[in-house]
Image (cartoon, rainbow, N blue to C red):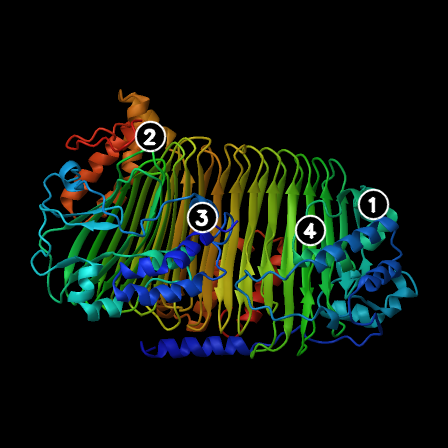
Amino acid sequence: MKETEKPEKGNQIIEEAAQAEYKYGFVTDIDTEVIPKGLDEDVVRRISALKGEPEWLLEFRLKAYRHWLTLKAPTWGHVHVPEIDYQAISYYAAPRQLKKGGVEDIDPELKRTFDKLGIPLEEQLRLSGMAVDAVMDSVSVKTTYRERLAELGVIFCSISEAVKDYPDLVRKYLGKVVPYTDNFYAALNSAVFSDGSFVYIPKGVRCPMELSTYFRINAAQTGQFERTLIVADDDAYVSYLEGCTAPMRDENQLHAAIVEIIVEDRAEVKYSTVQNWYPGDKDGKGGIYNLVTKRGLCRGDHSKLSWTQVETGSAITWKYPSCVLKGDHSVGEFYSVALTNNWQEADTGTKMIHLGKHSTSTIVSKGISAGHSQNSYRGMVKIAPKATGCRNFTQCDSLLLSDTSGAHTFPVIEVGNDTSVVEHEATTSKINEDQIFYCNQRGIATEDAVGLIVNGYAKEVMAKLPMEFAVEAQKLLNISLEGAVG
Amino acid sequence: MNALKQYIDLYDEHRDLIEQQSPALLNTLRRSAREHLEGARLPRKGSEDYEATDLEAVFAHDYGVNVNRLPFEADPGETFHCDVPNLSTCLYYSSNDAFHSSPTAERNIGQVVVEPFSMAAVDYPELMNAYYGSQARLSDPTVALNTLLVQDGLFIYVPDGVVAERPLQLVNIFNAALDMMVQRRVLIVVGKNAAIKLLVCDHTQSPDYHYLNNQVVEIVAMQGATVDYYDMEESTPLTRRVSSIYVDQHEGSNVLIDGITLINGFTRNNYHVEVNGEHAETHLLGMTIASGEQHVDSRTFISHNAPRCNSNEMFKYVLNDHAVGAFAGKILVQPDCPRVEAYQGNRNLCGAPTAKMYTKPQLEIYTDDVMCSHGSAVGQLDEEALFYMRTRGIGIDEARRLLMQAFVADVIDGVRLDALKDRLHYLVEKRFAGTLSNCACCSQACRPAK
């Protein structure tokens, strides 16, 4: 290949990648019960009533709603969230079939949907050995393996069921890590949250299988506001996976979730996300606004929380899975691959708040920007004055695949004592032409070479994903940059 | 509370007096500065880029402002010797914010022009008109305040093709017997293929008064120009300084800025560099040695607006006692600026449990064919290195001093003047040893004894 051909070929490859179809963009035609659009105290009361919630939870929602009214949407992110009309969204949508019966009567259409998404609700499940909670629009559709998990004392159910069955546990932990006063979207979620998963791992139990929740927005003009609460008691271990998709629609849909995790003494939680909400078409039309608050509290000594995320979807991503390292010797980890293409915008990163002595944290963030997208890493590492002997290492690399895309890094480091060590490294560059040339020389086409390099680049993070997810994530990267990079 | 208000009121009250005593050019911009200050607030601690610094509190003190331009009698040049051994410089003084003509220095060296604004407005009206206020951003309230109240400044002009033989040294001294705020202003225009080296040092003569230096420096480096700007602060715990340096770089220019803080009270240094020409090179260095209650905050912003240019940044902090250090740096590469190479580094040593460091290195890149990186680290001296030195019979204190000197050495080595480099090594050595207060050749005990 001649030297001059390279950039053109490269452009073409990226061009092709931009054309790649979003394969989860279908709409399932099932009967859905949607409450009318708009948001006021009555809507909050109605959601609560529909779900048959106790008084204290309604009170919590109303407090959050009243606080939300006093807040303004944050504007500091490197994303352009247009003015959202919160009165034009419906805050509750539920597949109607579900109401009729139990697990056996699950709507076949619904089941087909999850089969299409590759979510094994039935037989496949036994092979993969994974417990799944599937959430469609506002309600949890089905949770598998519940009985088997119950034998070990592990609670894995939708949060609405948990409110009914384990009110004390939910009340004890809900809003303790992300209070409703935390931020604009957290307040909104606290007021109108619909469903999500609740996980409780009792003392000393090592959860024998991966727990997984699959989120799907199906109904039009609705928002999804799920809430996940994970509690790992002393010496417990759990690996939790989260996946999400949405149909292709011209309108933008809002997704404002909260994930709270509490990790007690010597417990470990591994939280993995493959985020593949509909990113909008190649002209930037439609797509999900993914504005979520995720935070974990490592409350116990020697506790460990590990976030791994592969972000390929959403028109706008605004999310910062964080760790509050309160226990001595606690460990926080954050591994992220964020790929943006076309007109996507991602502003994502993490906060590591070191409060416990000798707590350590690792941050590895890999950004890949193509098309006209903007990809930012925003993070904070804070070491409190009394948190002596802490250690942090941060590495964020950005790879630019087009000259119209942007890659940005906004880290904040605050060190309050003299026995802690904090390191931060960041690089931004395009794919090394020498490396492509080297591959070309060995008979590897440019297309494959770009794929190899990108995969190699993201490998450090992919290796942290559970096996089943790693395969899916790998496929996702391929789809997002199809034809070239993969 | 709005600390700015007292100064705006002062201006509104004494507007005629202030304007009468300044060149007309300064008055033109003053009005737009007044407009910018309408409703403006100084950043509080915690706001963007001011994570550790509360400017509102710094300006809230009741400082005197010399609107009458009363002269302060003593000639600082007679009593104040701050020379660099083995370095022959052209020495200039400014006392508070007035440029002081000194008998030891000729007004214009060779073809290099060094004049107060009052004279430059007459001698070089075109240049003054074209460049005064051309870089400084009035959107920054401290810059707007400087523009509002400034009555004189220093103009340095190096005509095309002129290479200044000797470095130019400017010594800024606070010597008023009252609490005082000054608006220092410097405009440096370096013509095509011209070169100059500038050494600026800030001192305070009396440790008993509160001083605030709110300064703005504008540097314009034309095509192929080379500018070295060494900015050293050795003041007192009661001295506060808010400095904004703006640089406009044209094609092929080479600018080095080195900010050194040895002793101070509160310092905020803003560096704003616009790289507007291809093949331009920017070097931004910073070194801070802080102990006691010292507070040093630096913010850098380098905008690469042209392809094929490069920048290199390195800031190092050594913090002890209750010192607070802050660094916020941003590299911006605009769209369609390929082949930019930009590196940013920030390394910090926290030597005491109570010392605090805040750092925020940032990249904002809109072009793919670039090489950009930033790195930041906060840590302590290497225990093994200390142990190694102790096994060689070097005491713990001496070993720590040596390692700290080695830590800041590369910032000093970036200095492109050998004699100054030696002098800085010497000063840093003394600073770490805590004996900087005894300057051998100076009759003024301006610095606090440790």
Residue B217 can be seen in this image: yes
Residue at coordinates 58% horizontally, 37% vertically from top-left?
A355
Parent chain of label 2 = B
For residue B55, which numbered disc appears in the image? 3
- Which residue is the site of mark 4? A181
Given residues A486 and A57, the one toward you in this image is: A57
Crowding at mark 4 (Cα within 10 Å: few <14, some 14-19, many 20+): some
Parent chain of label 1 = A
- Which residue is the site of mark 1? A150
For residue B385, which numbered disc appears in the image? 2
Give the CA separation, mark 4 to mark 3: 28 Å
Give the CA separation, mark 4 to mark 2: 48 Å
Give the CA separation, mark 4 to mark 1: 34 Å
Residue B278 can be seen in this image: no
Parent chain of label 4 = A
Given residues A41 and B333, the one toward you in this image is: A41
User: Residue type at mark 2?
Assistant: Ala
- Which percent across, then down, holds residue A156? 79, 50
For residue B9, which numbered disc appears in the image? none
